[in-house]
Image: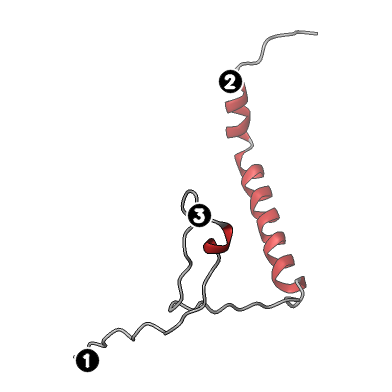
Amino acid sequence: MAQYELNLRDYWLVLRKRKWIIVFTVLLVAGFTLITTEFFSGKPLYEASARVNQSCYVRRRSWGSSPRRSRATRCARPRPPLPSSTS
């Protein structure tokens, strides 16, 4: 039995020789994954929404300030709306 050392060139030649098998396998797996996720995935169970109020602000905690002062404050009065540009 002949024993020899395989180098990178030998591996490259094997990959080039079998490239269509590799391409076919990758496409088959990708297609199977696409079909499975599109047709057999269920309805989403949860839905979320969020609303951000931009008229309030949060006081940033500075060095030496107490934790009570670093909490978010409620807005005493809302900011005036930005002027709209009508063209």
Residue drawn at x 66%, y 43% as measured from the top left: 21
Residue 2 is drawn in which quadrant? top right
Q: Quadrant of residue 76?
A: bottom left
- Measured from the top left, where is residue 49 in percent x and y? 61, 79
Task: Give, as a three-letter code, the residue at label 2.
Answer: Leu
Dot 1 and dot 3 residues touching (CB under 8 Å): no
Q: Describe residue 77's horizontal placement relative to residue 19 as left or right.
A: left
> Going from the N terminus, do you reach mark 2 or mark 1 first?
2
| Label located before the other in sequence (2 or 3) | 2
For marks 1 and 3 on the same chain, the one whose residue lies earlier in the sequence: 3
Q: Quadrant of the C terminus?
A: bottom left
What residue do we see at 58% from left, 27% from top? 12
Task: Left or right? Give the position of 35 relative to 53.
Answer: right
Name of the residue lying farthest toward the right: 1
Give SS at disc 3. Answer: loop
Up the image or down, 20 lies above or below 53; here it is: above
How many marks can you see?
A: 3
Q: CA distance from mark 2 to mark 3?
A: 64 Å
Tell me the element at label 2. helix
Question: Depth check: 40 or 29 in front?
Answer: 40
Element on which disc 1 rests: loop
From the image, tell me which residue sits under label 2.
Answer: 8
Q: Which residue is mark 1?
A: 86
Within-10-Å neighbours for mark 2: few <14, some 14–19, many 20+ = few
Which percent across, then down, holds residue 48?
Answer: 65, 77
Residue name at image x 56 percent, y 20 percent: 9
What amino acid type should be assigned to the residue bearing mark 1? Answer: Thr
Q: Which residue is mark 3?
A: 65
Residue type at mark 3: give it: Ser
